[in-house]
Amino acid sequence: MDEPTTGFDPSARRGAWDLVRSMTGGGTTVILTTHYMDEAEALADRVAVINEGRIVAEGTPQSLGGRDVGDATIHFRLPPTTPATALPVPGIVSDDGVVEIRTDKEIEVLATFTNWALRDNVDLIGLTVERRTLEDVYLHLTGYEPEDGVPVASTATES
């Protein structure tokens, strides 16, 4: 299937996804090409990233490009009554109290924060833990956005 949901509204897109899932659930192999990384993540058991006609990475959507290991980013908002100086682990705190912590030890950091929050009765509002998205990995693997976030200059020439 080549770009099967291009131009679909959200309802039609979900219907198409359900159709693909029913096909694969019944044992049919589906080869899907898409530029929608959320679609690849939702539907694919395996993903291959192709750049300039070559496969540059292949694996499960969860592990492609090392998404399942390495740095994670923890976000939450502090209640107005809790100062940033009270945090048990240093983080970047915005003016509106949103805390961001990047770590490769998210379990330890989360345990520290949740124990602190429970002990001191602090709400960790909107707590999330995120890793690089499949789109981030795609951009990195295809040379559009390296690890440091600085775009790679194109080496292609026009004729």
Image (cartoon, helix red, strand yellow):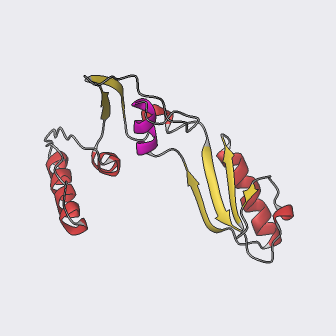
In the image as oriented, which residue stretches furthest toward the front?
159
- For residue 17, which quarter of the picture? bottom left
- For residue 8, which quarter of the picture? bottom left
Q: Residue 127 in magenta?
A: no
Image check: 45 left or right of 17? right
Q: Which image quarter holds the C terminus?
A: top left
Residue 14 percent coordinates (x, y): 23, 62
- For residue 18, which quarter of the picture? bottom left
In the image as oriented, which residue stretches furthest toward the bottom?
81
Q: Is residue 23 above or below residue 94?
A: above
Image check: 107 left or right of 46? right
**What type of secondary structure mainly makes up the magenta span?**
helix
Bounds of the magenta segment? 134-142
Q: Residue at x 72, y 68 (%)?
A: 97
Q: Which image quarter holds the N terminus?
A: top left
Depth check, front residue: 150 or 11? 150
Residue 35 percent coordinates (x, y): 28, 44
Depth check, front residue: 57 or 113? 57
Depth check, front residue: 149 or 91? 149
Q: Is residue 127 above or below residue 45?
A: below
Q: Residue at x 13, y 41 (%)?
A: 28
Q: Residue at x 19, y 54 (%)?
A: 6
Q: Is residue 63 visible?
A: no
Residue 67 percent coordinates (x, y): 49, 38
Q: Is residue 158 visible?
A: yes
Residue 91 percent coordinates (x, y): 75, 53
